[in-house]
Image (tube, rainbow, N blue to C red):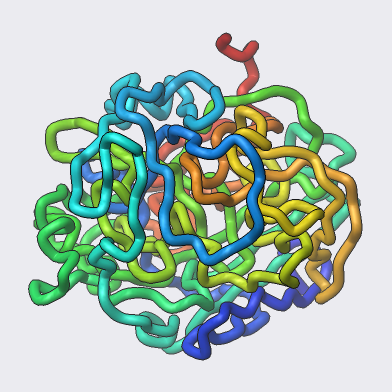
Amino acid sequence: MNALGVKMKFKTIAPLKEACKIARSKVFTTTGLVFSLSIGSAAILASCGGGGSDSSSTSSSASTEITTLVTSVNGVSNVICQRNAQCIDFIFAGVAQMPTTLSQLATPYTNTSTNIITLSQIPFVQGENSATAFSSEGSVFQMSTNPALDVVGFPGQGTRLFIGNGLPTTPMGNYPVQPNDPAYSYYAALPGGVNPAGTTPATGQPPTGYVNAAAIGISPYPLEGRIPLNPVVSGAYPINSLIVGITLTGAAWHVEKANDASGNYYNPLNALPNDKCYGHPYNQQYHYHSYSWKCFDQGTSGKQSPVYGFALDGFPITGPRGPDGKEWTNADLDICHGRESELDIPDGRGGFTKKLTYHYVLNREYPHSVGCFRGKVNYNQALGPDNPPNTPPGDFGTNPFMKEGFLYQNVASPTSPIRR
């Protein structure tokens, strides 16, 4: 019986590689120290990635093996909701000391003239570890639904619940990044920050904080979120949290923003190589960026991509293919990087519900996933309880894991009119 009073078993998406194991369908009840992020520190970079993208395509193309990604345009806005960008709420941006525009680095794998990242030239973080390398329990994840219980601020919309330990079924790289790893110099050059979850063996953090981004490892943590089961499109809202969605592999997607020690922000993949499933940790919290769906179930060739997870506003997140089997480019999507389709939505019981709905699309062009939210969000409920297990002493009323210690009201946000 889960926290919603409904016993439902969810089968996680099986990745393409044998090293990825199906998550055990059991609720995470034991504590797991985590690596969440301290928004106030300069360390936001190590966990986030992405930037405003220059859409190099104007029409859909057949689904093929992806060899390049389109990164953010130098100078694209961090605060305006528009196509090829990801807009951040002024509160989150202010706490994170985020400038109004993204910068771009001339890394060996990024062509700053064309905004193209060549995947074969990325020095990916080495290693392909299953979740058992970081926790004896492995990947623990369960999704359930309750149409009769509403999230505060969303009457009549029901609840979709996620509970897990934050470790995905997809392979993860060798974190902390070792000195002999080709990606080490990139991580060592970036700030590590101070983990709000405290100094414990589970966070791997010394009292003075992580010496740099390379020192950050992976740990389980209490992943828990409640989002609307039947969300309604009501606007285009800037993002006000680090996490933008939860995957059905048991991990989170983060915003496509990352900072250096000087306060500049970039598309993280532009500044920092990920592992081969396009993920890495921040404050020990493993999460995905950009080409994350590479390691997910690709579905049936020639047909629409499957649902890979859900955004904090409750809408599904799918892969790049439309109903005709062709990949959508940013030109096919709206300012929040989504559109409406009829989808087979996982019901939390091993089955699917066919529904015409708005959904976000993962594709090769920045911002790669959620650009802004089409529905309002109750961040207080979507990002776990205010005092989860293993909350450090004295941190009452905060969540140092999914909320990074940030306080959110238990309301549908934003509560005021949208900034235009």
Q: Is residue 381 left or right of residue 404?
A: right
- Residue 91 is drawn in which quadrant? top left
Tell me which residue sits at (52%, 66%) in the image: 65
Q: Is residue 159 above or below residue 164?
A: above
Q: Is residue 352 above or below residue 134?
A: above
Between 174 and 143, which is closer to the camera in this rendering? 174
Q: Is residue 141 above or below residue 121?
A: below
Q: Is residue 267 left or right of residue 182?
A: right
Q: Is residue 51 left or right of residue 203?
A: right
Tell me which residue sits at (72%, 78%) in the image: 11
In the rendered image, the quadrant that contains the N terminus is bottom right
Tell me which residue sits at (29%, 47%) in the image: 270
Where does residue 18 sit, x and y in percent of width and height? 52, 90
Where does residue 256 sit, x and y in percent of width and height? 41, 43
- Residue 174 is drawn in which quadrant? bottom left
Q: Is residue 347 left or right of residue 140?
A: right
Where does residue 385 sit, x and y in percent of width and height? 56, 51
In the rendered image, the quadrant that contains the C terminus is top right
Where does residue 53 sit, x and y in percent of width and height? 44, 35
Residue 188 visible (yes or no): yes
- Residue 50 is drawn in which quadrant? top left
Marker count (numbered): 0
Tell me which residue sits at (55%, 28%) in the image: 83
Residue 393 visible (yes or no): no
